[in-house]
Amino acid sequence: MSDLIYLYAAYTVIWAGVFLYVLKLHLAQRKLKQETEMLKEIIDEKKNKKNL
Amino acid sequence: MRFKINIKDLIFGVAIILILISIYLAFIYTPTHTTMGDVQRIFYFHVASAWLSYLAFGVTFVTGIFYLKSKDFKWDKIAFASAEIGIVFCTLAITTGPLWGKAVWGAFWRWEDLKLFITLVLWLIFIAYLALRANAKSKVSKANLSAVFGIIGFICVPLSFAANRIWQQYHPTVIATSEGSLQSSMGMALGISVIAFTFLYIYLLISKVEIDTMREIIEEIKQKVGG
């Protein structure tokens, strides 16, 4: 078996690892933004009810 | 039309450009190693990953000290974010190293090599750091315990860095030795990949701290709205 397989495996591990971690952070940020929007709506609704 | 440039995105952009340049340098610009062949090209990003993990654990160490001095939770947040990033890149370093080892030594791991052993211990200490944080009961005890653990764990970083220079076993020493020094093109490729990963680290650290801050604020608002 050629040693090149180890080179490919190492680069796959590195870039898959970096990509997955960046993706994990990106998805967490997106989820938190959605939650923020939801909370804003709830707070606005509560404010409107109070004003009525 | 005005463009709003976000400093975090700018850092990420610089990291991506430098990573692309270092891939070009590692695969096309640098010559094939005379004794190891193409498998030596693993080392450009293996070393950069190891460097990033040392840097990240170093930041955890410094911010851990800052936290214990000031009791300001912002330092704990940075320490935790940096430790997590350090673990990710330490994992990449101790995964890619054995792949190179198998091709060059004929074995994935050599238990008698202290560099490998100390780096594995470093990785395990920071895995325990995460477990400790996950199981701590209060915010204060979580921050106190992890600051102490992060400071103690960092001791392995200089040991891991120096191990192959002191004991000279199997792990090669590629920097700062006269007989084992790199060709200039190889040194440049390594330098650029290290700088690229440093920019990547700054981007990841800012992102992780932002996420943890946002999570805390949302939890506080949820408690207020719910109550």
Image: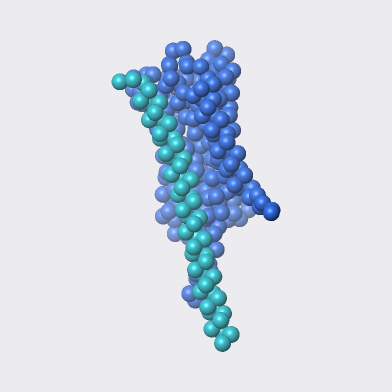
Chain colours: A cyan, B blue
**Position of residue B108 in the picture relative to residue A37 (left or right):** left
Residue placed at 51% from the left, 29% from the top?
B23
Residue placed at 45% from the left, 42% from the top?
A19
The percent coordinates of residue B120 (x first, y second) are: 41, 34
Q: Is residue A2 above or below residue B20?
A: above
Q: Nearer the viewer, residue B120 or B45?
A: B45
Q: Nearer the viewer, residue A50 or B24?
A: B24
The percent coordinates of residue B147 (x first, y second) are: 53, 48
Task: Determine the image quadrant of residue B61.
Answer: top right
Q: Is residue B40 above or below residue B75?
A: above
Residue B163 seen in this snapshot: no
Residue extending farthest front: B1
Count of marks overlaid on the render = 0
Residue placed at 48% from the left, 45% from the top?
A22
The percent coordinates of residue A16 (x first, y second) are: 42, 39
Residue placed at 47% from the left, 16% from the top?
B33
Q: Is residue B71 above or below residue A17?
A: below
Q: Quadrant of the N terminus of chain B?
A: bottom right
Q: Nearer the viewer, residue B211 or B120?
A: B211
Residue B178 seen in this snapshot: yes
Residue extending farthest left: A1
Q: Is residue B31 above or below residue B43?
A: above
The percent coordinates of residue B106 (x first, y second) are: 34, 19
Residue extending farthest right: B2
Residue extending farthest bottom: A52
Task: Determine the image quadrant of residue A10.
Answer: top left
